[in-house]
Amino acid sequence: MKPTTKNSSAPSVRSVGELQALAHSLRKTIVKMIHKAGSGHVGGSLSVCDILTVLYFRELNIDPSRPDDPDRDRLLLSKGHAAPALYAVLARRGYFPEEELMTLRRTGSRLQGHPDKLKVPGVEMSAGSLGMGISVGIGIALGARLQGKTFRVWVVTGCGELDEGQNWEAFMAARKYGLDNLTVIVDHNRMQNDGPNDDIMPLGDVPRKLEAFGWNAITCDGHDYGALLAAIQSAKAFRGGPSAIVARTVKGKGVPFMEDDWSWHGKLIDDETCARALEALEATDPCKR
Amino acid sequence: MQTVNNHEPPNTHAALPQTPGWDAKPLREIFGDALIALGHANPRVLVLDADLSEATKSVMFKKEFPDRFFNVGIAEANLVCIAAGLSTTGYVPFACTFAFLLALRAADQIRSQVCYPEANVKLVGTNGGLTGFGDGATHQCTKDLAILRAMPNMTVVAPSDAVTVWKAVFAAAEHVGPLFLRIPRVPGVTVHEPQIEFRIGHGYRLRTGQDLTIVANGLMVSRALDAAARLAVKGVQAEVLELHTLKPFDEALVVESARKTGAVVTVEEHSRYGGLFSGVAETLSAHHPVPIECVAIEDRFGESGVYEEILDRCGLTADRVVEKAQRVLQRKRGGLA
């Protein structure tokens, strides 16, 4: 359980170019992990990859050598099926050895199909059953305020996940308690397990709904680092209530034949698909252009 | 100020109320009084409710500690998960609502965000059993113990009277990890002396006997004692055990008694599926098989009415315990197949 890197709180403050290159490399890792595992959720892992990268490598006040620091920022991945993306980011950030990533979903591995916070350092919430992250985040944010602590709570949700009614219970409660130390980021890739949101359960205008619930709603391109950073700053600056960043993303982002195709939500990646995906990622590698 | 009596174990450090007749109040009010005392003793304790604070009596804590009380509205999923989040910051949250809403409505949240990550959350289910008598079947909860007992890492406690409700509240706060506490709405017959030690996972032998063992929990403990008294008149000596903790299950106490008596009757205000009867049968079938009869709620819903009358209609009476005791004695002697 020992983190590999000591004093690795430093890698923050990376340039946009560095963040892009990092995310590109993480996308390859994610594809390889899911291929090796024989199952897993690639579409939503690729859509959330840039969001997690910018938070873990630029924004969060964390120290992988002290994963239990009571003053650390908390990031809760409510869409637990994007575990491959979270694991890849945590390992790169120094929470555990990167070699371990290829044990995803293997018997005896601590890298469960959905994250188990008791097993993996850096995982703040066990997740899998959807719709619970914002509520847990509210509890943490309330706890922070009661103790006068200034750390921030970030909750990353999917969009299909917003079908779960509990989110809307949580949207009301966060407003009631005026939690400006809480920010929700919606990975709005417009797809869910069985199809596009609009076919399965139309979400309507999510930012307007959130505003109607009393939230400070911000929209941005979830793959544009400049836009993400600006949205994050705007959320942090807002006082008196919770903020939500509705990040427009592309399911399967980075692998052209997976992009915007809901069937890649949780489909197995076979050898041939893996080779094609890595080839496509290789071709767009920002380090090689 | 808490008074510490050196003769008492640590988890009883908040002295019981001294007011004469304090224990005659409905057990939910005893719970409310105990929460206030706990709140004074332990500043990490917070209380949450889901718009039933007047009914659960968590409102008593709110009046004493308004800044440590959170009413999240009619939203039990949110209630449980907010409590889980709070617990990760070092607080000891007590999430209160009717037992059915916790065990049924919020079951997945309890599984995923309390049990799986071993969150230090205390779930308090009031209206346990049929004690939501007037409201009828929808507000009664006869399945809570079965559901929560099946969840890994969960501790399940169902105290029997004012003394054990009071002490269980303090024991719950001291216990590290997920815990469900079932609180009846109505007053209970006080069966325990004030100085009794309350330890989670350790039952009581309330009466000794050699002919059969009656195992009971919750409000059925006093009925089990009534039944034992009636049996004594008939010349049958029943041993009476109380298992206030259904999980972890006090196997040693049950097995030791069954070895001595060779026959067991279980008595619970709960479905016959998955509760005390199941726990006793699971234990004895593995360690010391003997005839077992149960007094429990058959596969049916509750109903509205006067509490005692509903208990009668569900067969949860001392008479029924006596009948079952006689039946199990016949089986023990080989008189029944």
Image (spheres, coloured by chain):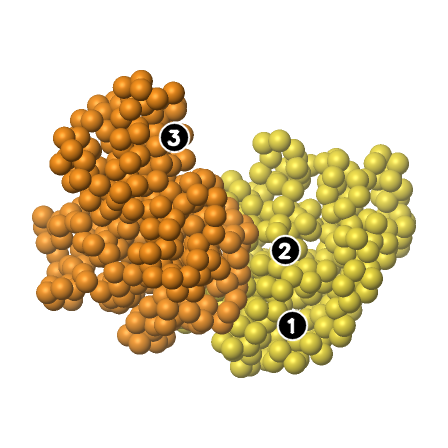
Identify the chain of the residue marked 2, using the numbered disc in the image: A
Numbered disc in front, either 2 or 1: 2
What label sits on residue A130 in the rendered view? 2
Residue wearing tag 3: B281
- Up/down of B295 relative to A234, above or below: above
Question: Horizontal and vertical percent for residue A236?
Answer: 59, 75
Residue B148: tell me if it is visible: no
Q: Secondary structure at mark 3?
A: helix
Per the rendering, the colour in which chain A appears is yellow
Q: Earlier in the sequence, mark 2 or mark 1?
A: 2
For the residues labelled 3 and 1, the Cα–Cα distance comes to 52 Å
What label sits on residue A26 in the rendered view? none
Numbered disc in front, either 2 or 3: 3
Identify the chain of the residue marked 3, using the numbered disc in the image: B
What label sits on residue A244 in the rendered view? 1
For the residues labelled 2 and 1, the Cα–Cα distance comes to 18 Å
